[in-house]
Amino acid sequence: MWAFLGSDVMFFGAFIATYLVYRGKSLVGPYPSEVLNIPITTVSTFVLLMSSLAMVLALHYVKEGEKNKGTLWILAVVVLGAIFMGFQFVEFREFAHLGLTPRTNIFGTTFFILTGIHGAHVTIGVIWMAFLAYSSNNGALRSDNALDLEIAGLYWHFVDIVWIVIFTVIYLISANDAPPPGMETITH
Amino acid sequence: MTTNALTFPRFFPRPQSETGIWGWIGTVDHKRIGTLYGITSFLWFLIAGVEALLIRVQLASAENTFIGPEFYNQLFTMHGTTMVFLVIMPLSAAFFNWLIPLQIGARDVAFPRLNALSYWVFLFGSLIMNAGWLTGDAPNGGWFGYAPNSGVTFNPGLGMTYWVVGLNILGVASIAAGLNFIVTIMNMRAPGMSMFKMPVFTWMTLITSVLLVLAMPILAVAGIQLQTDRVYGTHFFNSLAGGDPVMWQHIFWLFGHPEVYILILPAMGIVSEVLPTFSRKPLFGYPFVVFAGIVIGFMGWFVWSHHMFTVGLGPAANTAFAMSTMLIAVPTGVKIFNWIGTLWRGNIQLNTAMLFSISFIAMFTIGGLSGVMHASPPTDSQQQDTYFVVAHFHYVLVGGALLGIFSGIYFWWPKFTGWFLNEKLGIANWALMMIGFNLQFGPQHWLGMDGMPRRIYTYAENMGWEGSNLAASIGGFILGFGILLFIINMIYSRMNKKIAPADPWDGRTLEWSTSSPPPVHDFDEVPQVKYRDDFWFKKHPETISEYYHNEHDLVVEEDAPVGADDAEEHGDDHGGHGGIHLPDKSYYPFILGVGIAIFGIGFLTNTYVIAAGVPIFIWGMLGWSMEPVNDPT
């Protein structure tokens, strides 16, 4: 799993590098400052980070052999992950409503593909965790094969950490990238 | 404790048969998967060879009208792509599969079903990539697929979409295989085999696998970006929307240069096994060869911009990359001296495998030297996009990687099949290949110096290039006859079987300690390893003091964890086949592979096909994860 994560680091690294190289290169709007909403995304980021906490607790209880608590915390990971995805879905729909799609401009292209790829990772993680919650409830996931959960946990934490980087790079750093004078596309 | 296992409804019974097509589709045996890789990539090799010969016919004379520019573009694109991704990489993978478990004394790879998945994904990816030939719309943007030239604006039609979808699917196969071999080599070595007692081929496989795992995702990023550009109209490489045309080059070569070492390191590993065996000496300077490999694998990441000296990145960048490029020649040179040192005063046996290996050293040195020449930006500005570069990389890839692979084929063939390839035909095969190869690519050095550009389907009559081009074309056909002779050799040797013993060459590494071909479970008893080249010293204990005269070495050997306790810790049973744990066969890797393939085809046709791939993918995944490795008996 560590080797796979190494591979995934290169994968996200190249996408994030693409985003940074293309930052501020859009020729038409909407521009980042016109669409990005830091407060809302901060909430979704918080939700995702809490899911990592739930993950740690889930692993702890599964290792202890406390089946019900373990199952519950794995379910908490699933729910928190799903909430994060919901935020992303609403955000994407909002952006599309404001006229920003992957085809609109360079910002749209790099933004949607990078966050979309991350979203796909979260989706896979949620399905994986849901499967593990089912196994835990069923008794197939026990303290003696908790490694299955630990490996899933590594993946989950990794996806979290990548989001911290993405949140920093896209939202915190470039949220103030305003359109050039006279190029404003959205009037609030 | 009760064990509740999850079950998934089965639509097929679990494959049991050892033979027939279902036996192959359900196989998880590393040796059979290696054979599948070998056969598939050899067929692609023949197709790529035909493409190359068509190119040579077209270039044999000036102003030739044998094939037109459009078809010519498709030919050189697919020749390059096929040779890199569908021939040399999977042929190396065939060797990894066959040899790694045997060389480290294991019964299979770490994840046998994942291994099968790698093969099926590779097969489907290669078919998708070549599907364009059937519609007359084969990829035509060069093996490096430079965007925006490969984008939909300048390259409409499906051609480059086949290419990029195929490449993305192949990437999945490579990453999965790389992960598998890293874990296998790190965790499944025989008791007593510490890292520095591993055979050099295993070392080179490990380094190659690390490179694969780290480099292929970068290619995947470039591929996904190009794919969304082509299919969904995003703007990664669209200069009209502010996209940067140099972007693709950076991403592609950041993958592309480590890729060069992915191609050559396995061949270096093969040569490092063949030369000591037929010189009857241990490899000269084993730690140097290993560390040189590691250094190459590391430094390979810092040289990519030497493919872009003429882009105009500025003198600072060009100087830095020129220096790193020249530096990487040092570890490569170290290896060449080690190989020569291995030959020095050896008791040399000149058979086909050895001839190929020695030719590897010579040809690879020529290719390496021309590489050092265009490490210098001013020189490179003269050589960029000329036949000099074509000559250079054919000397390293054909003269290097392919000769190494042929050496490996002749060397390990008796182990793979249990019978020898004919030596006389083998030597004729080697001689024709060497003559043809040098006649084909030698003259291209001066054609390039004279300014003949690459990728141009014809040239004017008054350039003085006819003679060299005709020689190259004749050389191409001689090389082709050499390969034909290899096919004849396989058929002839199959019909007149000369049975091989377990250890025909008096070999040094563990694969020679089991029968030829090896049993399904590889080793009756898990080998205990004490020395580097352990099998040799078991056969010739009198030579131990000769090579381990350094007292420090001996002390280390004594400290190594050897013994029965260790084997028990590994949970391996001694003795007969009955107690040996082997994974059962499974269809799920094939099903998952089909799902990925249909998913990929969807990008070429329409969204419904993508949607059709998803349930098959999920079926394969769920079935796989709930299938026990062994059914209860």
Image: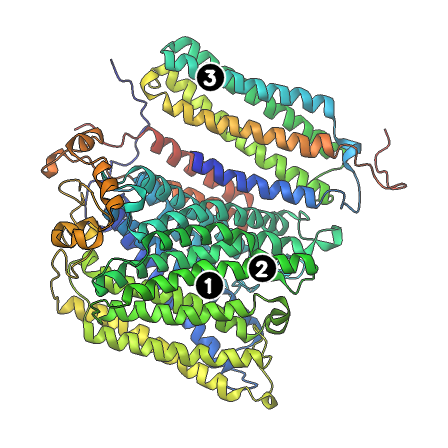
Q: Secondary structure beneath disc 1? A: helix
- Relative to B490, residue B618 above or below: above
Tag 2 residue: B323
Q: Could you tell me how far apart the alpha carbons at marks 2 and 1 are, in whole angstroms?
A: 45 Å
Residue B332 in which image quadrant: bottom left
The Cα–Cα distance between marks 1 and 3, rounded to whole angstroms, is 50 Å
In this rendering, the label closer to the viewer, 1 or 3:
3
Tell me which amino acid carries mark 2.
Answer: Met
Residue at the spot of label 1:
B134
Can residue B106 be spotted in the picture? no
Q: Tell me the mark number nearer the camera, choosing from 2 and 1.
A: 2
In the image, residue B186 sits, relative to residue A160, either above or below, namely below
Q: Residue at x 54, y 84 (%)?
A: B64
Whether B397 is drawn above or below A20: the answer is below
Q: Nearer the viewer, residue B482 or B393?
A: B393
Question: In x, y percent, where is residue A171?
Answer: 71, 31
The quadrant of the image that shows the N terminus of chain B is top left
Secondary structure of the residue carrying tag 3 is: helix
Q: Amino acid at mark 3?
A: Ile
Amino acid type shown at disc 1 = Leu
Q: Which mark is residue A74?
A: 3
Q: Residue B277 location, x and y as percent?
A: 22, 61
